Amino acid sequence: MKDFRYLTADVYVVLAVWQDISGVDVLDYRGACKLVKCVEVEVKGWQGKEFREKVEWLYGFLKWLWVEGKRLGDGWRYVTKYVVDMRVENGVREVVEEYKRYVRERFGKDVYVDLMDKEVIKAAKVVQRVAKELGMSVYEVIKYQHECWEEIREPLVFKRMVDEDLVKRRIKVKMDEDRRQGVVSRRFEESKRDLEALVAKYWRTILSVGVVFYVTKKGWLAEVAREYWEKLKNADLLKRNELKLEYSVENVVKRWKAEGCPENLLV
């Protein structure tokens, strides 16, 4: 008979939770051990979690496993997928909640959004990416989508934010209108400063790695990198030193400002 004296407490928790969910008394110690070892690697901070947190996580995972029709012994194979899926779902949920909050405040409506819809997931990622790039909050990005034109009477369908270029254009329309009206918000100025810092950071990285590795990329900085590389290819030592000064971080930032602070920096 196998000696189970050295099994960790987590293994017994797995078996207890599985039994509670499935209604079956399963003594698959080997499967539970493999699952725990996998969880210890894949779930960030597992060892430092409190008992209650571990039980909650295991209930979520093992219920998902049971609903999917998988066996406990195969559970370790699906930990990574579950962790990734939950991370995506949580990120999507946060964006959708901000969208629902805005709709509730602006239109007085409660709307339903399907978190499992692929277009919804894609739109949420676009909103997060644009917010990060422009130094705005998710709520502000969503708000600007609605305020870029005056005649809107109904909330924009969430999936309409799936096109990143269109999302950015709506923001630009709103900002341009604000400037025409003399309403230059402090947040806009802060966003511009954040973007300026991003230009400097990205260009510093490009110079460090080598401009040749960015010539196939897209965006304003990629265009500058291609231009720099074309000049460098046939330049002698003296010319290279001149180009180094011309394309310094400071000068590239100045050029970025002179060209109207393009938002699409690097893709």
Image: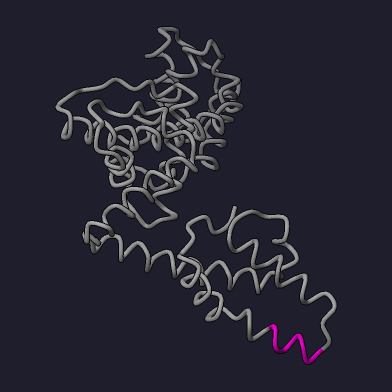
The picture places residue 210, in percent across and down from the top left corner, at 71, 70
Instruction: Write down the region rendered in magenta.
Output: 237-243
Q: Does residue 45 appear to the left or right of 71 in the view shown?
A: left
**Residue plotted at (51% across, 41% down):** 40
User: Which sits in the foreground, 165 or 29?
Assistant: 165
Q: Main secondary structure of the magenta part?
A: helix
User: Which sits in the foreground, 131 or 208?
Assistant: 131
Residue 144 shows up from this direction: yes
The picture places residue 70, in percent across and down from the top left corner, at 56, 14
Magenta region includes residue 208: no
The quadrant of the image that shows the N terminus is top right
**Residue plotted at (36% across, 48% down):** 173
81 w.r.t. 149: above or below: above
Residue 204 appears in which quarter of the rendering?
Answer: bottom right
Q: Does residue 24 appear to the left or right of 171 in the view shown?
A: right
Looking at the image, the residue that sits furthest to the bottom is 238
Q: Does residue 57 appear to the left or right of 234 in the view shown?
A: left
Residue 6 shows up from this direction: no
106 w.r.t. 265: above or below: above
**Residue plotted at (42% across, 31% down):** 89
The picture places residue 47, in percent across and down from the top left corner, at 43, 45
Q: Does residue 28 appear to the left or right of 117 in the view shown?
A: right
Residue 139 appears in which quarter of the rendering?
Answer: top left
Residue 109 appears in which quarter of the rendering?
Answer: top left
Looking at the image, the residue that sits furthest to the front is 180
